[in-house]
Amino acid sequence: MSVQQPKEKIPVGILGATGTVGQRFIQLLDSHPYFVVAAVGASERSAGKLYSDAASRSWKQITTIPAAVGSLTVQKCAPENFTSCRVIFSGLDSDVAGEIETAFLKAEFAVFSNAKNHRMDPVVPLMVPLVNAHHLDIIPHQRSLHNLQKGFLVTNANCSTTGLVVPLKALQDAFGPLSRVIVTTMQAISGAGYPGVPSLDILGNIVPYISGEEEKLEIEAAKILGGLSTNATAFVEAPDMKVSASCNRVPVIDGHTESVFVEFKNRPAPSIEQVTEVLKSYVSEAQKIGAPTAPEHVIEVATLPDRPQPRLDINAGNGNAVVVGRVRECNIFDVKFTLLSHNTILGAAGSSILNAEVAVAKGLIV
Ligand SMILES: NC(=O)C1=CN([C@@H]2O[C@H](COP(=O)(O)OP(=O)(O)OC[C@H]3O[C@@H](n4cnc5c(N)ncnc54)[C@H](OP(=O)(O)O)[C@@H]3O)[C@@H](O)[C@H]2O)C=CC1
Ligand SMILES: N[C@@H](CC(=O)OP(=O)(O)O)C(=O)O
């Protein structure tokens, strides 16, 4: 089923527009077929300045600030400053995202958040567009609980969780429930925002601790890989699946690499050839409904034995695909592989934009 795209541009606002994720939104939306940036917001430090001035020092994208956004005045993140927008993309710091995003929800905006604050809310989809777009079906219930006509709130997952759940979803769909997953991450420094990790801590080094990260990987996957109750009013966690994570910060600018070990519940376990074929041929709902920025291939399976590598593979599917390599037998669990995903594109702004495209296609953005 491919859905017709909107004929008119949809004005969007970006909260946290000066940050690492906010900048990615601005870069990605510059060429978007129907979303157009109409307002930008950040902290009181930036509010009142032209975006080009507020972001001049922190802008770290390889493209320049689009002129139309550079000339916008940065707003305080209050709903009354975003009345020209129908959609809000939030790249807000989690210290403030909770309250601010709730205010925009209550003011009837369609809010797409990258922050952790609302992810485990029982009526908020924790949505990885290449995995669980059907979780959007809870929105009518969310609206009725909050007494809203048009507004709703959807969150992205943690950036490492996002890369992980894509191949897990393909495997779960094909071979049934997963019982145990162990993952060790090697996470890029852009994951910590700007200015992020001090250079003296990370250059020539590895830091084997990212605050709160392992816990997020361990709980978010079960919500994302689970289903919805039949009346679409509650999420049902993937049963029996246990995830154990070990997270490391490595001196890479963009791209989270993960070593993954998977055990299936059903016996006999699939062969490596079957696993590889399933990963290669996985198709997501976002692709089926014709979301314009969905990658052609959700999972690219690397054939060379020393791939994926962040420097070489990070832009697969314009940053919205997951590259999986080294698919092989595991002599403790069933299969092991290495994956790479772009932490600020698929892991953040790219997924939010895809989530909004899916919401447009489902008629939720009015
Ligand atoms: N970086 C990544 O790979 C990923 C990040 N995330 C999440 O996305 C969010 C943004 O992350 P990131 O871009 O890396 O962070 P940054 O630190 O780079 O940016 C934070 C943004 O929040 C704004 N901000 C800070 N305080 C306030 C305030 N009191 N009121 C309004 N705005 C405020 C900042 O504005 P100002 O410039 O004015 O200070 C800035 O625009 C976080 O919640 C993070 O956890 C999720 C997945 C991946
Ligand atoms: N913690 C991630 C980025 C992030 O901000 O995650 P979360 O949105 O789950 O807090 C990293 O450092 O790479």
Image (cartoon, grey):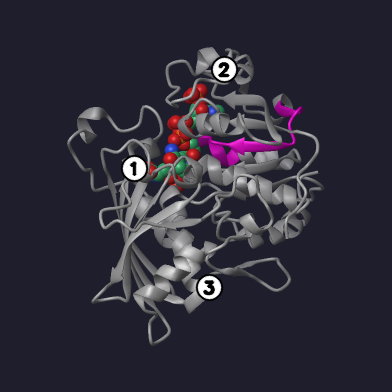
Between marks 2 and 1, how big is the CA–CA gap? 32 Å
Q: Amino acid at mark 1?
A: Leu
Mark earlier in primary sequence (2, 1) = 2
**Mark 3 against mark 1, which lies toward the viewer?**
1
Question: Helix or strand or loop: what does disc 2 sit on?
Answer: helix
Give the quadrant of the C terminus: top right
Q: Nearer the viewer, residue 259 or 17?
A: 259
Is residue 93 part of the magenta span, yes or no? yes
Residue at image mark 1: 312
Q: Quadrant of residue 200?
A: top left
Q: Quadrant of residue 204?
A: top left
Determine whether 220 is above or below 357 in the image: below
- Residue name at image x 42 percent, y 25 percent: 60
Badge 3 vs badge 1, beta-carbon distance below 8 Å: no
Badge 2 vs badge 3, beta-carbon distance below 8 Å: no
Is residue 95 part of the magenta span, yes or no? yes
Tell me if mark 2 has few (under 14), some (14-19) or many (20+) residues whose alpha carbon lies within 10 angstroms of its own.
Answer: many
Residue at image mark 3: 173
Q: Amino acid at mark 3?
A: Asp
Give the left or right position of residue 219, taking residue 82 as reference: left
Mark earlier in primary sequence (2, 3) = 2
Question: Helix or strand or loop: what does disc 3 sit on?
Answer: helix
> What segment carries the magenta color?
82-100
Q: Quadrant of residue 75?
A: top right
Q: Amino acid at mark 2?
A: Tyr
User: Mark 2 vs ligand 1: CB under 8 Å?
Assistant: no
